[in-house]
Amino acid sequence: MDWDNLGFGLIRTDYMYSMKCSSEGSFQQGRLRTKAYRKEDGRILLFRPDQNGVRMRIGAERLCMPSPSVDQFVDAVKQTVLANRRWVPPCEKGSLYIRPLLIGTGPILGLAPSPEYTFLVYASPVGNYFKEGLAPLSLYVEDEFDRASRGGTGFVKTISNYSPVLKALNRAKNRGFSDVLYLDSVNKRCVEEASACNVFTVKGNLVSTPATKGTILSGVTRRSIIEIARDHGYKVITYGLSL
């Protein structure tokens, strides 16, 4: 494996975790089928998997889906990482991207909750999300398409918040930009999010990020940055960041 040239793309690994649940039941013990980081000493660390489990439960409730418990979620992530530990890149060469997925898999035709659901966890070694790495990015301010709107699902992690950005993202990349910066859907003035991440600005000792008011995902990384910034003496404010 060429760890020095690891991009952000899917690489087939050895195992995937899977468990099922009926619409009126609960998830049982899963099984393994045919973003963890490695430290200098070889240990593998997970980044707040419990908080990701909480986030899945919030999203599942919004979408009328049953969800694994936080303990089940964390256990599934740990099992997936351990089963694929040979795919965890060396320290500072990348990470093992862990993708939990909750989908309706029961037979249904009409508009109604599925009679059965499947919870999956799979993983892939990845490098930086952007090809520029940690270098500055160029963002295209989108004033035509919206990512989310009030009353919708912008505050939860669901595919309906990501598939609609593809057209705008492709257009921005064709124009030479790295990503898209979305504005509020009402006035087109306040910054909300990029295609798949939260946005922060830093000026001196002040760190600012848009407030979460139903259209922005309260991401685990977002919350962590706010906590770390405050621990290091920065003043953090959340408000409507206008252009």
Image (spheres, rainbow, N blue to C red):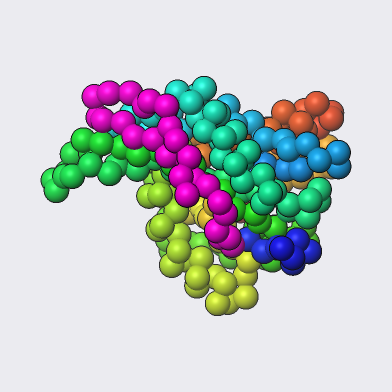
| Residue 108 in the image: above or below residue 75 | below
Q: Closest to the observer: 123 or 241?
A: 123
Instruction: Tell me the quarter of the picture where residue 65 sits.
Output: top left
Give the residue at the far front of this rendering. Answer: 34
Q: Image check: 106 left or right of 95? A: left
Q: Quadrant of residue 60?
A: top left
Compared to residue 1, the image places residue 93 above or below, namely: above
| Residue under the point 58% across and 77% down | 175
In the displayed structure image, the side of residue 67 where residue 12 appears, left or right: right
Residue at the image position 18 percent from the left and 39 percent from the top: 112
Percent across and percent down for residue 226 are: 70, 32
Whether 25 is among the magenta residues is: yes
The region drawn magenta spans 9-34
Q: How many marks?
A: 0
Image quarter of the N terminus? bottom right
Q: Is residue 143 above or below residue 208?
A: below
Magenta stretch: dominant secondary structure: loop
Whether residue 3 is visible: yes
In the rendered image, residue 148, in percent from the top left (x then y), is placed at: 42, 48
Q: Residue at x 25, y 29 (%)?
A: 23
